Amino acid sequence: MAQGGGAKQVKLERESELRIEVGNDAPLKLRLLNGTAEIFGTELPPEIWLTFPPRLKFAVFTWYGATIEMDGSTETDYTADETPNISYVNVHAVLEERRNRAKASPPDDSNSSQPQGPRVIVVGPTDSGKSTLSKMLLSWAAKQGWKPTFVDLDIGQGAITIPGCIAATPIEMPIDPVEGIPLEIPLVYFYGHTTPSNNVDLYKVLVKELAQVIERQFSANAESRAAGMVINTMGWIEGQGYELLLHAIDTFDANVVLVLGQEKLCSMLRDVLKNKPGVDVVKLQRSGGVVSRNAKFRQKSRSHRIREYFYGLANDLSPHSNIANFSDLSVFRIGGGPQAPRSALPIGAEPAADPTRLVPVNINRDLLQTVLAVSFAKDPDQIISSNVAGFIYITDIDLHRKTITYLAPSAGDLPSKYLIAGNLPWLET
Ligand code: ATP
């Protein structure tokens, strides 16, 4: 039921939730009046008004009962008493047990059998609630004092940084329901497109790089190894998408596979993973609250994400406009554009373009209004295996003066002269 402006109170019975879609034009204010409640695993502070931006979709859930007050307009708000949260918190309890066991067992001499916390991967079709379940598991773990690693392999709707990237970051506190994940030190690899089919091989290479870095961090840090990781994946589960899921399970050595809302995917995964000892495949119900988002909405939220990177969630950041000479920067693209699938080639023929070949890009006006990643590489050879420091947005190219004007989160020189172009257009509006 859509609601106009004005404050209203909602009483929630135990184990029920208030599902909200904030209106398109104005934020919504909400506070917890009494009882206890959480948003996707993060507890609400008592009495304090929180402001939720337009279009945000979320639920306020209570284990024992609560009264909520909200002020502002919503697209929808309704109460639901059927949620899968008990089964989700049961999963959390099992993961906790494994973390405690990992922490308690003495390290072994051989690296491979060091005590391990859970390596959870959340899979399922689009709009099954994968990101939401990942957030809940991470926030519940952080509340108990763990610092689990969040790995986001979803290049379509990045939860850690802008779309087109895969990334990982330790979660040190329950995730803020408004601000999301703090962007302090994420480990980010730039893929540059929002669908993996553009360059499946590159996607796999980057997943491998990310996994290797996390593996090194885990072997140096018993605490993060015991806390383990939660991996969020893409909603592409057919054909090549399915192959990529198997690749991720294998590459990260996942030992808990949570399948949301799809019998078929669950039984396929159980079948292929039955010979892998120590991997549990668990089917979980999709929440009825998960909102389906169409292509237009997804496109819009991608743009919002990029805008948020430069300007902040509430326009609270001021990016800097900088000018550089063409000769100060080197732009590369990885791979030679979309590949012809092997199946389209004569038997035995290899695709001509190497999908991970580094191609120098001439600076011209084609780069206008695109987002480029700034690599940490010290040398072009290292670009593919290097993570990125951040992003810039090209606002002007003067061919006559040979200068580029770009927007960056801060003033000063870029950390490296090597930039990676992808296919991330953005209209700064
Ligand atoms: P995709 O694969 O497309 O990235 P997903 O499976 O990760 O999607 P989510 O992002 O978790 O799905 O959920 C989709 C939307 O539904 C999000 O905006 C999320 O905040 C919202 N949502 C999830 N659960 C609930 C709920 N119980 N009540 C209200 N909104 C919800």
Image: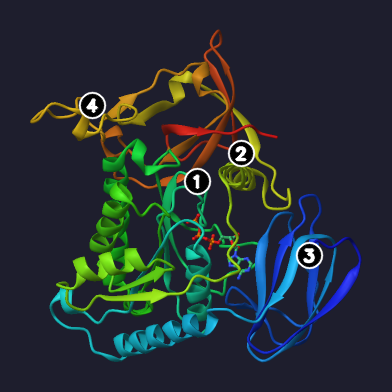
Is disc 1 surrounded by few (<14), some (14 to 19) or many (20+) residues within 10 Å?
Answer: many
Q: CA distance from mark 1 to mark 4?
A: 25 Å
Asked if the residue at tag 1 contacts the one at tag 3, i.e. Cβ–Cβ closer than 8 Å, the answer is: no
In front of the other: label 3 or label 1?
Answer: 3
At mark 1, the secondary structure is: loop
Q: Which residue is label 1 attached to? A: 163
Q: Which residue shows up at 89% across the image and 61% down it?
A: 5
Callout 1, which amino acid? Pro
Q: Which residue is label 2 attached to? A: 411
In front of the other: label 3 or label 2?
Answer: 3
Q: Earlier in the sequence, mark 3 or mark 1?
A: 3
Tell me where residue 87 appears, x and y as whole percent.
47, 83
Is residue 359 among the parts visible in the rendering?
yes
Query: Which of the labelled discs sits on residue 313, or is there none?
Result: none
**Relative horizontal placement of residue 143, taking residue 70 as reference (left or right):** left
Quadrant of the snapshot with the C terminus: top right
Q: Which residue is label 3 attached to? A: 1
Q: Which residue is label 4 attached to? A: 353
Tell me where residue 361 appears, x and y as whole percent.
38, 22
Is disc 2 surrounded by few (<14), some (14 to 19) or many (20+) residues within 10 Å?
Answer: few
Q: CA distance from mark 4 to mark 3?
A: 53 Å
At mark 2, the secondary structure is: loop
At mark 4, the secondary structure is: loop
In front of the other: label 1 or label 2?
Answer: 1
Residue 31 or 45: which is nearer the viewer? 31
Is disc 4 surrounded by few (<14), some (14 to 19) or many (20+) residues within 10 Å?
Answer: few
Quadrant of the rendered structure where residue 271 is? bottom left
Q: CA distance from mark 1 to mark 2?
A: 23 Å
